[in-house]
Image (cartoon, grey):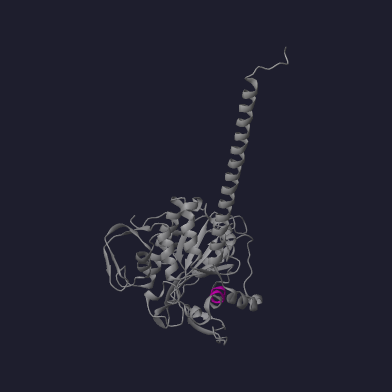
Amino acid sequence: MGGDVGPGAGVSALGVGLARRKRRRWVRWGAGGVGGLLILVVGVGWGVYLKLDGNITADEAAEAELRRYEKDRPTSLVSGAQNILLIGSDSRSGDGNRKYGRDSGTERSDTTILLHLAAKRDSATAISLPRDLMVDVPSCRRPDGTRTGPRFAMFNSAFQTGGSACTIRTVEKLTDIRVDHHVVVDFHGFTKMVDAVDGVQICLKEPVNDKAAKLRLPAGRVTLNGEQALGYVRARKSLGDGSDTERMGRQQRFLGALVNKVQSNDVLLNPVKLYPLLDAATSSLTTDPGLASLRGLYQLVRGVRNIPTEHVRFLTVPRESYLYNADRDQLMEPEAEKLFERLRRDEPVEVAQGGGSSAEIRLGKGSREPGGADSPAPTFSGNTAAEHTCE
């Protein structure tokens, strides 16, 4: 009959049932394993995020001081454009910094760069401000709570007496450019970031043997590790003519090479390469509260990671010897004001190697003047991140 089953049917059905239960068990185990793996990955990712996010120090004191003088600060003229003040501190306090010298209890700005990011994020302009530039420093709050009076002094005295807030207000008074964010990095942080990208290649026309900078390098293309890079950008006596002008130019070329290295190696798109850089950077940065988080830094990096290296420009503010002291600098006018005005209006600035003067004016594509004529864009002596020091 069609409804009858043979004696082997029960065994067959039992085998099928066991196989199905086994498959269901494997599916449950597999699903549980994948779920556990996802939880582990999410947990590790969240842990990494919290670690990196907690590394950054927010400069709350500077934020409070800047709010106090908000009504005196410049206003931004172009929506979306950003100006970030990068301050290299020579502090000997903190992890890894004592080996660079005795901790005197005060900090000076070893390097100060005003970085302008165009609103369209199609260019970036980094302007070095000399330490010995004579400027008007406003009344600033000292670390002990007392205040200084307004004075005419060297630029780096602003950071020494009033920290980042005093430096920002001095830069804004000098340029009439609103500083939207600031970043302070110390010696140890600089070396860690260079090591995190496996060194940066530069080119030396002559060998270097500088005992003071603890730097011994051959001529030609050399990949610098963190300690060597610090010596290279800070050396005075053994490289070039020993002037601060040559030193700033060397710093600009090195930063250009660093930008080139980060972009060419896809560091920003590769988590394995990006994590060491983020860990090194975040653990050594003091920033305004707006940048003092991974989210804040990510939003900044996301906007600049696609800028072509030939549109990342480095130059020094136009200056000349101070009238009353040849060892000091003063702004060269009207060239300096032309530069500041273009940055305020987010207009193009061009750079070219050589040219002698720090502010040689050449023809270039500029903005439209009333009547429809193109105004020439100033071309300053400098370099781009796409250029190599050997060439």
Quadrant placement of the C terminus = bottom left
The answer to whether residue 350 is seen in the rendering is: no
Position of 1 relative to 254 (above/below) = above
In the image, 258 versus 372, the foreground residue is 258
Q: Residue at x 55, y 78 (%)?
A: 166
Q: Main secondary structure of the magenta part?
A: helix
Quadrant placement of the N terminus = top right
Q: Is residue 5 magenta?
A: no
Q: Quadrant location of residue 182?
A: bottom right
Q: Residue at x 63, y 34 (%)?
A: 21
Q: Residue at x 47, y 52 (%)?
A: 272
Across and down, in percent, residue 208 comes to: 28, 65
Segment tinted magenta in the rendering: 167-172
Across and down, in percent, residue 282 comes to: 51, 64
The answer to whether residue 204 is seen in the rendering is: yes
Q: Quadrant location of residue 197?
A: bottom left
Residue 102 lies left or right of residue 21; in this view the side is left
Across and down, in percent, residue 386 comes to: 42, 54
Given the current orientation, which residue lies at the most extreme top position? 1
Q: Quadrant location of residue 78?
A: bottom right
Q: How many marks?
A: 0
Given the current orientation, which residue lies at the most extreme front position? 7
Across and down, in percent, residue 309 comes to: 46, 53
In the image, 304 versus 374, the foreground residue is 304
In the image, 143 versus 41, the foreground residue is 41
